[in-house]
Image: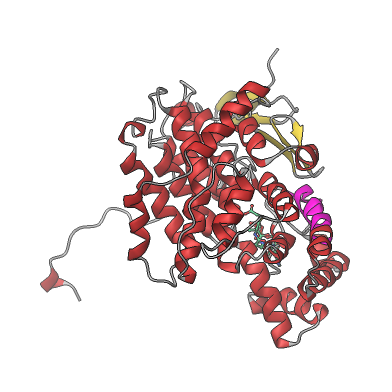
Amino acid sequence: MPETVRIVTGKQEMELQVVEGTEGEKGIDVSNLRAKTGLVTLDPAFMNTASTESAVTFLDGEKGILRYRGIPIEELGERSTFTETAYLLIYGHLPTREEFTRWERLLTRHSMIHEDMRRFFDGYPMTAHPMAILSAMVSSLSSFYPYALNAKSDEYRDITIARLIAKLPTIAAFSYKKNIGHPFMYPRNDLEYCANFLRMMFAVPAEEYRPDPVAVKALNLLLILHADHEQNCSTSTVRLVGSAQTNLFASISAGICALWGPLHGGANQEVVEMLDDIRHKGLTAQQFIAQVKDKKSGIRLMGFGHRVYKNFDPRAKIIKKACDEVLEKLGVRDPMLDLAKQLEESALRDPYFVERKLYPNVDFYSGIIYKALGIPTQMFTVMFALGRLPGWIAHWKEMIEDPSTKIGRPRQIYTGPRETHYVPLEKRG
Ligand code: CMC
């Protein structure tokens, strides 16, 4: 007998179906509620609303569990590569040797961007934020692949997906080169994904550049940890935009814009700027924590807190450990890391943070590793976007291939004026 929930509205009673996920999560299906009762549900910020069923990622915020297609994030971080994890997320299984070879070939063969597109970069001021460039360039890709505009057609879907994953590092690195006035470095097919990206970022035509294997490994790990996080703000954006059958490039471009916000992917940049600021002002960790606790200050401890994780963020645990290892192996001694640890320690002991279940999130230590790899602060959110891309694509694909998908269109409770009438300009007070 399927589980139901009974609701009573006035004299009316109604049974609502309970939907159960594979990990025992339950949700009340309210899709018929308005038709039967005239009522809608009100849930600002979707604190309590499952917008979809999804088979991509499972996370349990209370237990600190994160799994892509059932595989724990800890195992993927330890044993997989970013491109393999991307395949897993998008196609639902780990690739066979043959599938992986084909996938890798696609990702290397499609990494160049059209030469005309290269010239787009000339129009930006040198100070342009790379996220602005990234979202515009990704949307622009749709103008070079008109046959990818039909989101429902599956004929070119796989090649469009591969193109996007292959080209994003090139666009990201070019946006950085534009920023510093260096010549663009074209991608190289003999390098693996992350090594190729580091080369496009840091090589110059004047000399040989060999990516440091420690940096390549660290980057693979960071991108894997960011690769998906179920229905977060940017992924929900990609799904909502894509639900209008918008092409993949435009949908992902919208996701990049959502990610840019300081409460979302922009937090990694904010963390390092916050640490810089604390050091610059000569504050101790305790003094800064006291400022954060004073609500009037409007200051948040960036990199702390999460809508879903109320125990710990498993990604933060892995990143913290990696941070120590990577800095040591690269021979980097960064006082920011000590300050971050002091802040974490103070916060975790403080009732303000304990009562609100605020823990370090993925962004708290990631910026310190990016910094050690030589990646400038302004590029941190771009790095998040590089990592999150397979997740966005997996969700877009899952949605577009589901025949029951309808355009996303929330309701509202209107609170504006009741009917009133137009007053001509000369009669307005
Ligand atoms: N510093 C200080 N107080 C905080 C913080 C923080 N970082 N985060 C939450 N709080 C307080 C908040 O003021 C509120 O207190 P009160 O109950 O007294 O009003 C309470 O904790 C609940 O916070 P909320 O803003 O209602 O929680 P939320 O689920 O809406 O927000 C969040 C989650 C991540 C936006 C928030 O914790 C935050 O702003 N954190 C800092 C930004 C950040 O690190 N973002 C990255 C998130 S992880 C990567 C990603 O997914 O993008």
In the rendered image, residue 164 lying in the magenta stretch gets the answer no
Residue 103: which quarter of the image? top right
Residue 247 falls left or right of residue 238: left
- Outermost front residue: 207
Percent across and percent down for residue 176 are 50, 63
Q: What are the residue bounds of the magenta stretch?
A: 309-324
Q: Is residue 407 above or below residue 122?
A: above
Residue nearer the viewer, 141 or 233: 141
Residue nearer the viewer, 416 or 119: 119
Residue 421: which quarter of the image? bottom left
Indicate the quadrant containing the C terminus: top left, top right, bottom left or bottom right: bottom left
Residue nearer the viewer, 318 or 274: 318
In the rendered image, residue 320 lying in the magenta stretch gets the answer yes
Q: Is residue 205 above or below residue 419?
A: below
- At horizontal 70% and vertical 12% (from top left) the residue drawn is 1
Kindly tell me whether residue 112 is visible in this rendering: yes
Percent across and percent down for residue 392 are 54, 40
Percent across and percent down for residue 142 are 35, 41
* Quarter of the render that holds ligand 1: bottom right
Residue 2: which quarter of the image? top right
- At horizontal 65% and vertical 43% (from top left) the residue drawn is 229
